[in-house]
């Protein structure tokens, strides 16, 4: 892949478009689970392949742990979506998505925030290095 090529460009565009439609209709102010249900409906309508609350296993030093985590959505079998309904993304939100990417070996995460007047989203490739900002 060309280094200038955007990972899952078309798929991301479709996912973010669906999220924009949900935000356009519902606006901000609801809890996360409301947006999750509406987004699932929008994915169905747009034929976007997804798994909701997909259970993913965590490995530690090559051994699976008994505890798992649930991604809000996994779309196209390789994109983790983490939904929020908050005033701003925090370092913990970024840490969460990068941990999910690391544990799942998936390639791309998208953080989506329905908690503002305008939809906020961040595409986060697993290959991107993230560092906790301790100055916050």
Image (cartoon, helix red, strand yellow):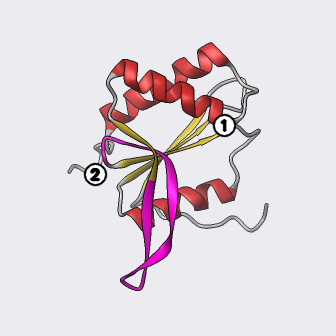
Q: Position of residue 109 (x, y in %)?
A: 45, 49
Question: Which residue is most to the top?
Answer: 25
For image coordinates 36% across by 57% down, the residue present is: 106
Residue at 38 percent across and 27 percent down: it is: 14
Say if the magenta span includes residue 107: no
12 or 71: which is nearer to us? 71
Q: Position of residue 117 (x, y in %)?
A: 72, 23
The boundaries of the magenta stretch are: 55-77
Quarter-of-image position of residue 34: top right
The residue that label 1 is drawn on is 32
Query: Outermost residue toward the front?
Result: 66
SS under mark 2: loop
Secondary element at tag 1: helix
Q: What residue sits 76% from the left and 27% below the top? A: 29
Mark 1 and mark 2 residues within 8 Å of each other at the beta carbon? no
Instruction: Please name which of the two marks, 1 or 2, marks the residue nearer to the observer.
Output: 1
User: Residue 64: which quarter of the image?
Assistant: bottom left
Position of residue 65 relative to residue 53, above or below, is below
| Image quarter of residue 55 | bottom left
Q: Earlier in the sequence, mark 1 or mark 2?
A: 2
User: How many angstroms separate mark 1 from mark 2 (CA)?
Assistant: 34 Å
> Label 2: how many residues lie within 10 Å, few (<14), some (14-19) or many (20+)?
few
Residue closer to the observer: 33 or 1: 33
**Foreground of the two, 86 or 10:** 86
Q: Residue at label 2?
A: 3
What secondary structure do most residues of the magenta stretch adopt?
strand
- Percent x, y for residue 68? 50, 66
Image-based side of 26 in relation to 135, left or right: left
């Amino acid at each position: 892949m060309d280094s200038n090529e955007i990972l899952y460009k078309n798929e991301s565009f479709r996912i973010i478009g669906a999220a924009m439609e949900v935000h356009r209709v519902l606006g901000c102010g609801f809890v996360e689970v409301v947006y999750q249900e509406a987004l699932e409906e929008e994915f169905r309508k747009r034929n976007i392949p997804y798994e909701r609350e997909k259970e993913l296993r965590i490995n530690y030093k090559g051994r699976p742990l008994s505890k798992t985590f649930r991604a809000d959505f996994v779309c196209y079998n390789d994109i983790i979506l983490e939904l929020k309904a908050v005033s701003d993304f925090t370092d913990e939100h970024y840490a969460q998505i990068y941990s999910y990417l690391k544990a799942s070996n998936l390639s791309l995460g998208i953080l989506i925030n329905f908690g503002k007047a305008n939809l906020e989203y961040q595409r986060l490739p697993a290959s991107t290095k993230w560092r906790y900002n301790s100055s916050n």
